[in-house]
Image: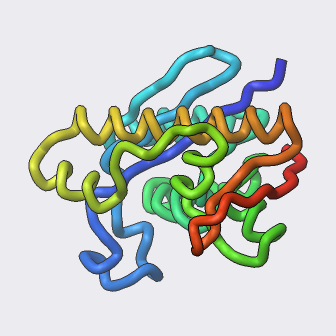
Amino acid sequence: MKNIVYFDLETQKSATDVGGWNHKPDMLMSVGVTFSTGEGEYRIYDEAQVQDLIKQLRRADLVVGFNLINFDYDVLSHYTVFDFHEVPTLDLMKDLETTLGHRLSLESLAVPTLGAPKVADGLTALKWWKEGKILEIAEYCCFDVKITKELHEYGHAHGEVFYNDRFGQKRTVKVKW
């Protein structure tokens, strides 16, 4: 059986805090969450455990996430010299952007495909970090990993997912996941 690792992380700092989006490694990880199909369980990592997270990602047969390539991997690059381009990765956001010609949010896919709205957003997670509410960040991050997993599984099973366009219209997009 293939070990698919679904992954998401939240940061300690915003792009504004670090001088812009070109400084993503300086945003630092607050919490990272994975779900491994090989182990059948979620794992929650804090910054002190980031090397264990990186090991799990490196051992995966496939890492699946949403905006991994242009965000999560850049944040993790602060902690390692490892090149994440070597990891077999399916970035759902990037795949859909290639197909549609524009980016979608996870929320715009989760609601019409799964009926599952997100429970928070990155700015809320940053507020929680400043308030020391690590459990809330971990729960939110787990929920995003679950949405990503279920979205991937739905697309794999049905060959399509749904999204709400900028006018609120439900659309279909074919996928080969």
In the image, 16: left or right of 167? Answer: left
- What is the x, y in percent for residue 17? 25, 76
Screen quadrant of the C terminus: top right
- What is the x, y in percent for residue 124? 25, 55
Residue plotted at (29% across, 62% down): 123
Q: Is residue 124 visible?
A: yes
Which of the 4 quarters of the picture holds residue 45? top left
Residue plotted at (59% across, 60% down): 67
Q: In this view, does 70 lie above or below 173?
A: below
- What is the x, y in percent for residue 92? 70, 54
Q: Is residue 49 above or below residue 9?
A: above
Q: Is residue 48 visible?
A: no
In the image, 32: left or right of 167? Answer: left
In the image, 170: left or right of 48? Answer: right
User: Which residue appears farthest toward the left when viewing the image?
Assistant: 131
For this rendering, which residue is in front, 79 or 141?
141
Q: Is residue 109 above or below residue 133?
A: below
Residue plotted at (67% across, 40% down): 151
Residue plotted at (10% across, 49% down): 131
Which of the 4 quarters of the picture holds residue 152? top right
The number of numbered discs placed on residues in the rendered structure image is 0
- Visual colour scheme: rainbow
For this rendering, which residue is in front, 74 or 107?
107
Screen quadrant of the N terminus: top right
